[in-house]
Image (tube, coloured by chain):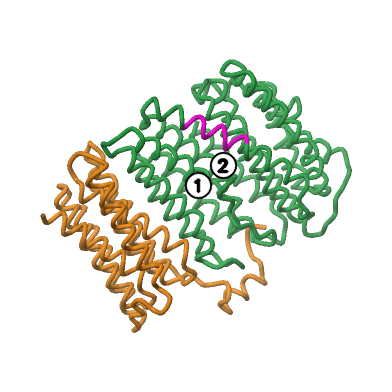
């Protein structure tokens, strides 16, 4: 699964650099994007979770060293908290002792992962005016997906069965919380850039539920959703930045299409992921599917707002939006090749 | 006995990093902590790892020592930090020696206490020098943590931890209030 996410991140970087608006320094964007990709490759190849944490620490320090309105210490807080929680969780899993320690370990792992990505209850401080690469967006939409796939697959191998159940339950609980909070906040918050950030959180809510279900359908749904975050929501957010600054909401057919893709309507990838997620939840515990289905309706108002905030993409950006929507439709209509590739 | 002394040294170093605001105090804390973890790595059968930890941590410590002349040990208002150090040691000792079983109790104590103390130091501080020193110490504790596993992790974590400890002290981090940083922010280059 992680390899597919790495390829998607590389494709997103190429697309975003090629279609970047003139005022964006492409060299800077490319440099930091490549640094992120190198770290992601190292995370993918690391033989143990301890090395993943050390790589994450290097990446956090490098990103915090970038020039920004927020100071160095503030930007390091969330990643360091994440690494500390993951490190303590990992240590508790390894130590011989009572079973409750291993449950504490599971809590540390889940809390650390959520803190690393920037989800509730550890939302990263967000400045709407900050450049994308220096902001928390790369954690939630570029590095985060691969990191989550790696940490969760390694953690499942470490955890004993009784702690594994608690692990899944925590993922589902946090997933529901982020799903509701993110979708309502992306609809109700005043600032459009902040609304985009909350929409990432909402998608992550579904991803956590998918991973927490621990059935094949749940994992498949999580993979499709993560891919649609990396190669869908992230580039769309990047292209919306100029319109967000100029405050030029637009109501054209393209905005409606983007809104439909963001909301997970048919035939886009989000729809297939939602169907798989509901099927997995029904097979496990049907009331959970009911809650998920009700929560999924909350995507619509926020997505319509985000679609409008895109403005009217022109020239290269219009081509970029077209590519993203086409890939999204392909994944929605025919996800099987991707799922087979990922071994799902 | 040597391992227990090394674990105590690691806690003492972490405590100094928590209690000091000046560069010299931070450097001494990092040096003590490095010595503790290097001895623990050596005792765990990782001589190459011990050398990497010692080299990385001590170079970082020298760099920190040279960048300022103040000690800043226990300035006014540092009582909560002192309480944190003592409480962390007591909880760590209880978990490592009483709650858990098996060999390597000193390593368990050192890893748990240093991860906790350095994590809280990074979260509570706004000074770049303090944060960087804490991260150097944090990386050494993370590098030591694989030693808790039943299988040998090899020297790779210690090597990477040592490299981070030295590399992080050379990071040219600027605060947002730095005039050069402000100029660049107004220019808003890169990344949209």
- As drawn, the residue found furthest toward the bottom would be B69
Disc 1 to disc 2, C-alpha distance: 7 Å
Magenta part, dominant SS: helix
Magenta range is A167-176
**Tag on residue A73?**
none
Q: Is residue A154 left or right of residue A299?
A: left
Secondary structure under badge 2?
helix
Q: Position of residue A200 (x, y in %)?
A: 65, 43
**Does the CB distance between marks 1 and 2 fall below 8 Å?**
yes
In the image, what residue occupies the spot 48% across and 69% down?
A: B173
Chain of the residue displaying label 1: A
Chain that is coloured green in the picture: A
Residue behind mark 1: A37
Secondary structure under badge 1?
helix
Residue behind mark 2: A9
Q: Position of residue A273 (x, y in %)?
A: 64, 26
Above or below residue A334? Residue B182 is: below
Chain that is coloured orange in the picture: B
Magenta residue check for B138: no
Crowd rating for badge 1 (residues with CA inside 10 Å; few <14, some 14–19, many 20+):
some
Crowd rating for badge 2 (residues with CA inside 10 Å; few <14, some 14–19, many 20+):
many
Specify which label sits upstream in the sequence, 1 or 2.
2
User: How many circles with numbers are drawn on the protein?
Assistant: 2
């Amino acid at each position: 699964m992680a390899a597919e996410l790495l390829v998607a991140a590389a494709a997103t970087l190429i697309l975003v650099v090629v279609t970047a608006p003139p005022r964006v320094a492409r060299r800077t964007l490319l440099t930091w994007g490549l640094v992120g990709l190198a770290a992601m490759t190292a995370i993918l190849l690391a033989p143990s979770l301890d090395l993943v944490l050390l790589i994450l620490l290097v990446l956090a320090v490098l990103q915090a060293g970038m020039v920004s309105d927020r100071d160095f210490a503030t930007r390091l807080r969330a990643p360091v908290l994440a690494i500390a929680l993951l490190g303590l969780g990992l240590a508790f899993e390894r130590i011989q002792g009572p079973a409750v320690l291993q449950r504490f370990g599971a809590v540390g792992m889940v809390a650390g992962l959520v803190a690393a990505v920037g989800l509730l209850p550890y939302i990263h401080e967000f400045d709407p005016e900050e450049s994308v690469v220096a902001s928390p967006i790369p954690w939630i939409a570029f590095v985060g997906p691969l990191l989550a796939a790696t940490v969760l697959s390694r953690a499942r191998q470490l955890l004993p069965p009784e702690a594994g159940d608690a692990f899944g339950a925590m993922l589902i609980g946090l997933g529901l919380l982020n799903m509701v909070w993110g979708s309502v906040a992306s609809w109700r918050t005043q600032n459009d850039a902040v609304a985009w950030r909350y929409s990432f959180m909402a998608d992550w809510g579904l991803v956590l539920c998918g991973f927490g279900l621990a059935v094949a359908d749940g994992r498949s749904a999580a993979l499709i959703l993560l891919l649609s975050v990396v190669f869908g929501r992230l580039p769309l957010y990047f292209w919306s930045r100029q319109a967000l600054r100029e405050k030029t909401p637009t109501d054209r057919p393209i905005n409606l299409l983007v809104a439909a893709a963001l909301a997970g309507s048919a035939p886009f990838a989000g729809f297939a992921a939602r169907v798989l997620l509901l099927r997995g939840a029904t097979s496990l515990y049907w009331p959970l599917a009911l809650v998920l289905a009700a929560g999924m309706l909350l995507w619509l108002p926020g997505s319509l707002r985000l679609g409008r905030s895109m403005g009217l993409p022109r020239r290269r950006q219009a081509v970029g939006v077209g590519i993203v929507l086409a890939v999204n439709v392909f994944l929605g209509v025919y996800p099987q090749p991707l799922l087979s590739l990922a071994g799902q | 006995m040597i391992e227990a002394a090394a674990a105590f040294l690691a806690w003492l170093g972490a405590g100094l990093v928590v209690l000091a605001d000046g560069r010299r105090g931070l450097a001494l804390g990092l040096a003590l902590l490095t010595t503790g973890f290097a001895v623990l790595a050596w005792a765990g059968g990782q001589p190459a790892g011990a050398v990497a930890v010692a080299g990385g941590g001590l170079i970082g410590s020298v760099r920190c020592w040279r960048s300022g002349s103040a000690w800043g040990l226990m300035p006014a208002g540092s009582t909560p930090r002192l309480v944190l150090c003592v409480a962390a040691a007591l909880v760590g000792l209880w978990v490592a020696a009483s709650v858990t079983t098996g060999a390597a109790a000193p390593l368990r104590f050192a890893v748990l206490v240093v991860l906790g103390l350095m994590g809280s130091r990074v979260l509570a501080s706004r000074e770049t020098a303090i944060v960087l020193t804490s991260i150097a110490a944090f990386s050494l504790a993370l590098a030591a943590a694989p030693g808790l596993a039943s299988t040998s992790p090899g020297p790779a974590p210690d090597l990477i931890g040592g490299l981070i400890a030295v590399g992080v002290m050379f990071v040219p981090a600027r605060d947002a209030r730095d005039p050069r940083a402000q100029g660049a922010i107004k220019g808003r280059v890169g990344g949209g």
